[in-house]
Amino acid sequence: MTDAQRRAIEELWPRFGVEEGSRIDAVSLFGRSLPLAVEVGFGNGDALLQLAAAYPERGFLGIDVYPPGVGRLLAGLAARGLDNVRVLRGDAVAVFEERIPESSLDAVYVWFPDPWPKKRHQKRRLVQPALVALWARALRPGGTLHLATDWEDYALGMLEVTGAEPRLVSPAGPGRFAEGPGDRPVTRFERRGRRLGHGVWDLVLVRRGDQGSPASGAA
C-alpha cells in the first residue's frame, strides 16, 4: 500500500466508510431514498468511480477486503467530488447474510472476480450457489445481477450456477450471455485484453416478480 493510499484511508474513511455492524440500505448510507447498487470486489475502484460520475442520482456501495484498492477508491472519490459512493471493507458473504435487507437493492455487480483457474482451487470462486441465492434475495423484483469475466470456463460456470437460482431470469434467454457490457464501464485492462484477442462474457440476470414471473419492465 502506498503512502497516499494509507493517508486516504486515515483521512477519508470517516466520510465514505461504512462501519461494522450497521444496517445497509440507501437511507442509512446516504440519508435519503435512492436507487442502490452494490459492487462486490471493486478492485482498484475504477468502475465505481465511472458509474458514480455517470449516475449522480444513484447510490453505490463498494465491498472489498484489500486496503490498497480501498485507499485508491477513497482518494478518487475525494478528487472527483463524488458523494454517492460508500465503501465497506469486509467479507461479502457476511455482509449479504447479516446486513442487507431482502428486496432492498436495485443492482449487484460482480465484475472480473478472481477466476482461480486451477481445478483444485475452483471451489474458492466467488460465484457459488449459496452466494448467488443471497444476491437474489437482496435484489428487489426487477433488480439486476450483473456478472462479468474474461475466463470462459468461469463464464460457463456462472451460467450453470445462476441458471439454477429460481428467483433469477435472463432477459437474453436461458443459458445465454448478454450481447455487451451494458452500463458496465469498460476498463483499460479490458480494452487491452480485447486487443490481444481475449474474450469477455457478461451475464445479466433479473430478479423475478413475486409471482415467479419477471417483474414488469425488467427486460
Image: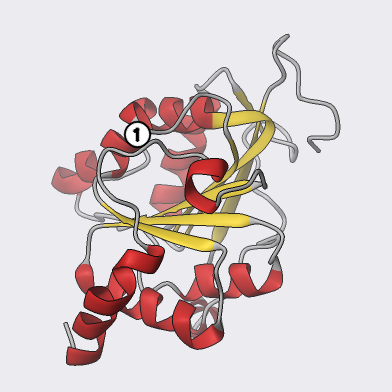
User: Which percent across, then down, holds residue 193?
Assistant: 48, 80
Q: Quadrant of residue 132?
A: top left
Q: Quadrant of the C terminus?
A: top right
Horizontally, residue 26 falls left or right of residue 219, namely: left
In this orientation, which residue lies closer to the viewer: 95 or 219? 95
Where 196 falls versus 131 (above or below)?
A: below
Q: Residue at x 76, y 24 (%)?
A: 214
In this orientation, which residue lies closer to the viewer: 87 or 113? 87
User: Which percent across, then down, holds residue 53?
Assistant: 64, 74
Inspect this view and state whether residue 189 appears. Answer: no
Q: Residue at x 56, y 49 (%)?
A: 31
User: Which percent across, then down, holds residue 91?
Assistant: 24, 45
User: Residue under circle 1?
Assistant: 128
Where 59 falls versus 55 (above or below)?
A: above
Horizontally, residue 156 falls left or right of residue 4, namely: right
Residue ranking furthest to the top: 211
Count all numbered tags in the image, as a single digit.
1
Q: Residue at x 60, y 68 (%)?
A: 52
